[in-house]
Image: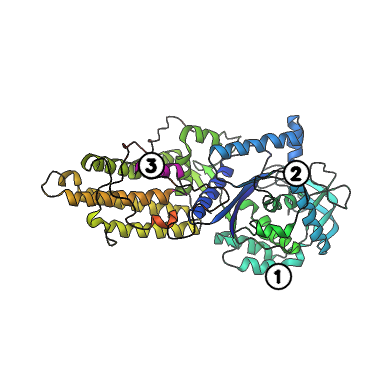
Amino acid sequence: MSYTLTTPLYYVNDRAHLGSTYTTLACDAIARYQRLCGEQVVFITGCDEHGQKIQRTAEAAGVSPQDHCDRISAGYRDLWDRWQISHDRFIRTTDPRHHELVAQFFARVEARGDVVEGRQQGWYCVACEEFKDDPHEAQDPECPTHRRPLEWRDEVNLFFRLSRYQAEIEALIAQPDFIQPPSRRREVENFVAQGLRDFSISRIDLPWGIPVPGHPGHTFYVWFDALLGYLSALLAADGSGPPGPVDLDALLQRGWPAQLHVIGKDILRFHAVYWPAMLLSAGLPLPRQVFGHGFLTREGQKMGKSLGNVLDPEVLLERCGRDPVRWYLLRDIPFGDDGDFQQQRFTDLVNNDLANTIGNLLNRTSSMARKWFDGAVPPAGEASAGDHPLAQATRLAGEQACAGLERLDFRRAAEAVLQLATAANGYLNDQAPWKRMKLPDQETGVAADLYAVLEATRSVAVLLAPLVPELSARMLHQLGLEPFDSAASGVAAQPKAATSPWLAAQRWGLLPPGQPLPPPEPVLLRLELDSPL
């Protein structure tokens, strides 16, 4: 069985921003961790390309909606490649195969009696592609999210009979693990407790969308269409190919249901209420978990173009590199809460954690081992014992990192690895091999001490792989070891056995004595930012 996880399908009204990059980096860390555990991973991302907002954005730019979508989607693809995101599927909702799947899914829902015609009246936000609950008599209402005027709509739409699924949705969200973190579950419980209302799934006279079969003039509401992208992404390994018959039930052998949807908290209702009801109507299994993470601010302020404080992921990549940004976002911000990007703290954490605590540990230990033991890993001696202090610290770090990653608590996982590196630094300082090596009959003890620190550092390198894969690979190379592939597409990186890389990280004594050590080089240069990002 596959482990399937998804980012949202990003709306292509504009190019990728730091928020979408943050979500995607988090999903990449999960995918890499699951592969290292031996799971066959299907990591889905992509773009949502229909709706009135896209049509208006394209018109304002003087291009066709398709040309606009092609350009923005290509930008997402390119950016994810540059960030080395290990996704297995990239779906675009303009893909003809997606259109076929939407039509077949709708046919199932309609045959179930869950589609009715009705009149939709209310204030509509084009930016959200969503009706708001503002009172009809409100004067000049605006969207609380986008701070833009709402538009009054009064039209005949097709509705999905969400109200029929009140009991099923109540039972679903009562499951403690379905919606995470717990604060998000309470939000959905409050919404559902008010009573589920049928929601519109079509628009009229909107050419940029998928036509509704059997209902001339109607196109699918963008959210009904976009959620189905998680299914159409599973139709082909490379996300391309000619349109053809779609067998919805065959998706059960291609990776559905998803174990995890990772989304921003602003689209939680669509994923935790509407989406499960749609799947129930179509007779398909439900995703295992929906995780709604928080938003990012900058130096305590909401980011916005008008404030001129938007953090561009391309600028971050060019000036700082992948691993520093990954480390800061995953290590410092509790995933699920809102987070604040602070440049000084970013610099300090990267330099203290990665360059100093971890990088310097490996560099100085490797240098001493090369100098005193013929350029190789020293004999293990007494350090091979399972009750060695660093062996115990390694087991604890592995357990805590695993527990953190299983719960999407990246901060806990990062801190567990840091604690192991700190323990190894402390042990090295306490043993002071640079002093003992000058004394007679101390070579065996020094060898064991250096072996223990190098072995603990090997575990640090493996445990870092989901969070900062390039740094992990450089560390393993400096230990004379072959890096493993945590980005293998669509297949398990290792068999699910005691020899899988993740489990091996928690085993003591796997670094071969006598293993040649390459000349030490800094595994991460200190970050020096002389101007604001």
Q: Is residue 80 above or below residue 393?
A: above
Q: Main secondary structure of the magenta part?
A: helix
* Of the image marks 3 and 1, the number of the one nearer the N terminus: 1
Q: Residues within 10 Å of mark 1 (few under 14, many from 20)?
A: few
Element class at badge 1: helix
User: Per the image, is 23 magenta?
Assistant: no
Q: Give how far across and how far down residue 495 sits, in percent.
A: 49, 57
Q: With 337 as the anchor, is 108 left or right in this view?
A: right
Q: Amino acid at mark 2?
A: Pro
Q: Residue at x 71, y 37 (%)?
A: 69
* Residue at which label 3 appears: 477
Instruction: Calculate the distance from the C-alpha at mark 2 to the C-alpha at mark 3.
Output: 43 Å
Q: Residue at x 62, y 39 (%)?
A: 76
Choose top left, top right, bottom left or bottom right for residue 350. top left
* Residue at which label 1 appears: 167
Q: Residue at x 66, y 38 (%)?
A: 73
Choose top left, top right, bottom left or bottom right for residue 470. top left
